[in-house]
């Protein structure tokens, strides 16, 4: 066959290629051995059949003879002897260069012979594999042909017997025949309950999976810490649940604060926050063993760890949009720090919508703007929380400000923050949202870091990505993100770690609550 003939031809070519390779290898080895000698001998020079080497060797031998004559007659240091040695060295170098060129030629021939051998070997291997497949197919074909012959023989015998029996019959045969007897059915033929149940189950699962994918594609909001870390490329510091403050606890705390003897005050001393603070702004004090408070401890620990690398005393709290709870986060973080014994001040720097000032110090007559303008001393503009010792600097806004960003980027605001940095352990600054105004970006060279508040299940992914992407100076100083107002029962479907059952299982005996 054609494959067998090609195999024989390739075997002959492969044998010739191997012989050629062996000859090339022998020549290469021999020339490399000659190159180690100082002067090739006559046999080697003749075998190479190189006129240049023969001429150089003859000239070298002539110089060597003359050098021996001059050295014996005039001494080896004679000028003529020295010149002959120099010329002999030059001839040796020329012969070495020529031998190297020949060696490279032999090496190239060897590589070509080797490549040809490998190519032929690979082609032969492929041809042998194809021949084996063809042989196997031929064996299968022969087996099938043998079976076909047997089946044809059986069929012919059956037809012959059938014709003989038909001719021998004396009465006609009916067309109907009983092959097997009837048996009662084992069950109903329709409807097939099991098949219907399996079909509906599979269709239901497929519909549920499609509905889940559709809901996931539509629900483009933040719900898990993985989303924050993957999409925003920053840390998720805490997930703060929606809490309903206990009125009894808040009332007891307010009563305890009111029972304290009033401290002696003068005109220059900071005023006290005597009015009742909304429970939500003092949740970490009212319920210190809750998961809500534990989230703020995580934020403080992150700030302390970051402070070990670079100074991180001035922390700004901001968000993408209004009503995400940034003021509540800022107040509770400052309350937690002050209640822990550190000296902290809370600055309301939201000059467009000072929520903290309205909630905590609605009767304030002077604040941040008056201090920056030099109209009021800092001590007369601040308030002291009598329960925690937190200092609060309000922002009294009588009319809408058109240039609030220039105020926050001014040198006066920088000097104020520097003075607070020296006087307090922590300075918490409540900033306006990032999307509506540019005030936050104006503070990037003054504040140490930022905590970004995102409302869980409400703030859309693209809004936060766009705002942080358009403010790289804020993103570079970002301490992390806080997911606020999380529904714990719904959150358990995404991340069980933050579930209420986790705290109930491991910390209920220590007094932890949601």
Image: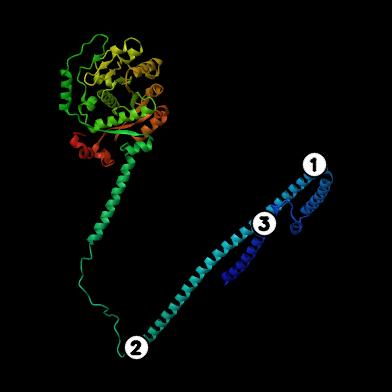
Q: Is residue 487 left or right of residue 159?
A: left
Q: Which residue is mark 1?
A: 77
At x 36% / y 89%, what residue is drawn?
164
The answer for how far apart the CA atoms under marks 1 and 2 are is: 128 Å
Residue 328 spot, x, y in % from top left: 27, 26
Residue 272 spot, x, y in % from top left: 23, 15
Name which of mark 1 and mark 3 comes first in the sequence. Answer: 3
The reply to whether discs 1 and 3 touch (Cβ–Cβ < 8 Å) is: no
Can the viewer see residue 319 in this picture?
A: no
Marks 2 and 3: which is nearer the front? 3
In what element is the residue under mark 3?
helix
Residue 420 spot, x, y in % from top left: 34, 17
Marks 1 and 2: which is nearer the front? 1
At x 17% / y 22%, what residue is drawn?
254
Q: Which residue is mark 2?
A: 165
Q: Quadrant of the N terminus?
A: bottom right
Residue 184 spot, x, y in % from top left: 20, 72
Circle 3 Cα neighbour tier, 10 Å, few/some/many (<14 / 14–19 / ≥20): many
Q: Mark on residue 28?
A: 3
């Amino acid at each position: 066959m054609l494959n067998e003939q090609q195999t024989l031809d390739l075997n002959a070519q492969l044998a010739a290629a191997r012989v050629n390779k062996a000859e090339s290898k022998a020549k290469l080895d021999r020339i490399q051995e000659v190159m180690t000698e100082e002067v090739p001998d006559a046999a080697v020079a003749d075998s190479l059949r190189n006129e240049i080497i023969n001429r150089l060797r003859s000239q070298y031998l002539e110089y060597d003879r003359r050098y021996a004559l001059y050295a014996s007659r005039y001494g080896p240091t004679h000028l003529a002897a020295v010149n002959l040695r120099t010329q002999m060295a030059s001839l040796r170098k020329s012969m070495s260069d020529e031998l190297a060129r020949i060696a490279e030629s032999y090496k190239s021939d060897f590589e070509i012979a080797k490549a040809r051998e490998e190519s032929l070997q690979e082609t032969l291997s492929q041809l042998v594999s194809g021949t084996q497949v063809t042989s196997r197919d031929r064996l299968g074909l022969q087996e099938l042909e043998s079976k076909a012959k047997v089946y044809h023989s059986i069929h012919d015998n059956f037809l012959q017997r059938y014709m003989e029996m038909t001719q021998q019959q004396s009465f006609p045969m009916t067309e109907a025949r009983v092959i097997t007897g009837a048996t009662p059915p084992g069950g109903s033929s329709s409807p097939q309950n099991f098949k219907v149940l399996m079909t509906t189950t599979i269709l239901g699962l497929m519909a549920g999976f499609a509905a889940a994918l559709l809901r996931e594609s539509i629900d483009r909001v933040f719900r898990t810490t993985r989303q924050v870390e993957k999409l925003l490329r920053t840390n998720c510091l805490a997930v703060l649940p929606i809490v309903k403050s206990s009125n009894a606890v808040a009332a007891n705390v307010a009563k305890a604060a009111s029972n304290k003897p009033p401290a002696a005050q003068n005109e220059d001393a900071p005023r006290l926050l005597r009015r009742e603070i909304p429970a939500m702004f003092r949740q970490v004090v009212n319920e210190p063993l809750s998961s809500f408070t534990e989230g703020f401890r995580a934020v403080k620990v992150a700030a302390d760890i970051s402070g070990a690398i670079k100074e991180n005393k001035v922390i700004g709290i901001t968000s993408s949009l209004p009503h995400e709870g940034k003021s509540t986060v800022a107040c509770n973080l400052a309350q937690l720090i002050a209640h822990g014994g550190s000296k902290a001040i809370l600055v309301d720097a939201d000059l467009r919508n000072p929520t903290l000032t309205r909630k905590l110090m609605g009767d304030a007559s002077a604040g941040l703007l008056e201090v920056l303008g030099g109209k009021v001393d800092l001590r007369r503009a601040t308030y002291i929380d009598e329960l925690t010792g937190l200092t609060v600097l309000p922002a009294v806004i009588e009319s809408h400000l058109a240039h609030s960003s220039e105020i926050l980027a001014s040198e006066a605001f920088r000097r104020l923050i520097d003075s607070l940095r020296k006087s307090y352990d922590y300075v918490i600054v409540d900033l306006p949202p990032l999307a509506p105004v540019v005030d936050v970006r104006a503070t990037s060279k003054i504040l140490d870091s930022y905590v970004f508040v995102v409302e869980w299940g409400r703030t859309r992914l693209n809004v936060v990505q766009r705002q942080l992407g358009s403010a790289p100076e804020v993103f570079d100083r970002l301490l992390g993100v806080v997911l606020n107002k999380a529904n714990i029962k719904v959150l358990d479907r995404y991340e069980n770690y933050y579930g209420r059952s986790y705290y109930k299982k491991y910390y209920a005996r220590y007094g932890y609550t949601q």
